Structure formats: structure tokens, C-alpha cells
Amino acid sequence: MITIRKATSGDAPEIISFQQAMAMETEGMELVPDVLTKGVTAVFRDPAKGQYYVSEDSGRVVASLMITYEWSDWRNASIWWFQSVYVIPEYRRKGIFRMMYDHIRKEGMNSGIAGLRLYVESENVRAQKTYEAMGMNGNHYRTFEWMI
């Protein structure tokens, strides 16, 4: 049985391994373990940075994601951003992300958010089709970045 819950610091090892796998799968990037570990644990130490959620199957963590917050003065409410979404390969295409999305959307609506957003790597067509099938669209904004 699949359950969705807010992650605890005890979930950090799984979240760290998921992020290493995602970076390699989607961008061919090997993350620096010490930097990643500090980044994940920083979220647990400071809830203003975000909140992790996990999906479990019979006690096994099979997916995780992070929500971060953007204040919208136009809407006088927060927008929650999905980040660091990862589902282990054998659980993909089984509706895990949809369950997590629905859970977080309900939680967000109860908290008075203005909406949900995410960004996706431009060549990750499978993920884009998943998000579109859930009623999200990528037509409104493009993301530009400057990174060190």
C-alpha cells in the first residue's frame, strides 16, 4: 500500500541517494556527496528552506520530492514549487507522482497557496508528458538561470 508523508531527517539517506541517481539520469552529473548531504540536511534544520515528502510502499521509501516556497505579491499568497522529484525506476509509471501531487495540492489548498509550479529539464519529455496529463502546463513562463 502506497502512503505519502512529510519526510523526517531519518529519510535523509534515501533522499540523498535519490538525488544522486536523478542528477546522473537526467543530466549525467555526479553530485559532490558532502555538498549534497549538507544541502539535504539544511532543509530539515530550517523549514523555511522547504519541506521534503516521501512515498512509501510497505515501509520502503520509493519516491521523494521537495517543496520550496515563493511569495507572490500579485496574489498575496505563496506558490509552492516542486523540486528534486525522484521515483525509483521500478515504481515509475504507477501513479506515484500523481498521488504525491494530489496529496500536496490538497495540503497547499488548505494552507491558502496561490498555486503549484515546477521546472523540468528541457529534454525530459517523459516527465513533461506526466505533468501535462495532470493538468499542468508549461506555456506561461520560461526559466532562465545563472549558476556558479
Image: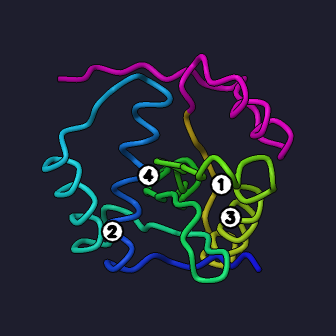
Tell me which label, 1 or 3, sits earlier in the chain: 3
The CA distance from mark 4 to mark 2 is: 10 Å
The CA distance from mark 2 to mark 3 is: 18 Å
Task: Give the residue at mark 2.
Answer: 12
Residue 4 shows which numbered tag?
Answer: none
In terms of secondary structure, where does tag 1 sit?
Answer: strand
Which-is-in-front pick, marks 1 and 4?
Answer: 4
Q: Residues within 10 Å of mark 1 (few under 14, many from 20)?
A: some
Residue at the (19%, 47%) spot, across then down: 33
The CA distance from mark 3 to mark 4 is: 16 Å
Residue 18 shows which numbered tag?
Answer: 4
Residue 100 shows which numbered tag?
Answer: 3
Asked if residue 127 is among those painted magenta in the image, a careful observer would answer: yes
Residue reaching furthest to the left: 34
Position of 1 relative to 26 (above/below): below
In terms of secondary structure, where does tag 4 sit?
Answer: helix
Q: Position of residue 6 (x, y in %)?
A: 51, 78
Q: Residues within 10 Å of mark 3 (few under 14, many from 20)?
A: many
Which three-letter amino acid code belongs to the residue tagged 2?
A: Ala
Tell me which label, 3 or 4, sits earlier in the chain: 4
Residue at the (68%, 51%) spot, across then down: 90
**What segment carries the magenta color?**
120-148
Looking at this view, is 108 or 23 the one in front?
A: 23
Tell me which label, 2 or 3, sits earlier in the chain: 2
Q: Position of residue 55 (x, y in %)?
A: 61, 70
Which three-letter amino acid code belongs to the residue tagged 3?
A: Met
The reply to whether discs 1 and 3 touch (Cβ–Cβ < 8 Å) is no
Which-is-in-front pick, marks 1 and 2?
Answer: 2
Q: Residue 98 lies in what quarter of the image?
A: bottom right
Task: Give the residue at mark 1.
Answer: 115
Residue at the (21%, 64%) spot, across then down: 42
Which three-letter amino acid code belongs to the residue tagged 1?
A: Gly
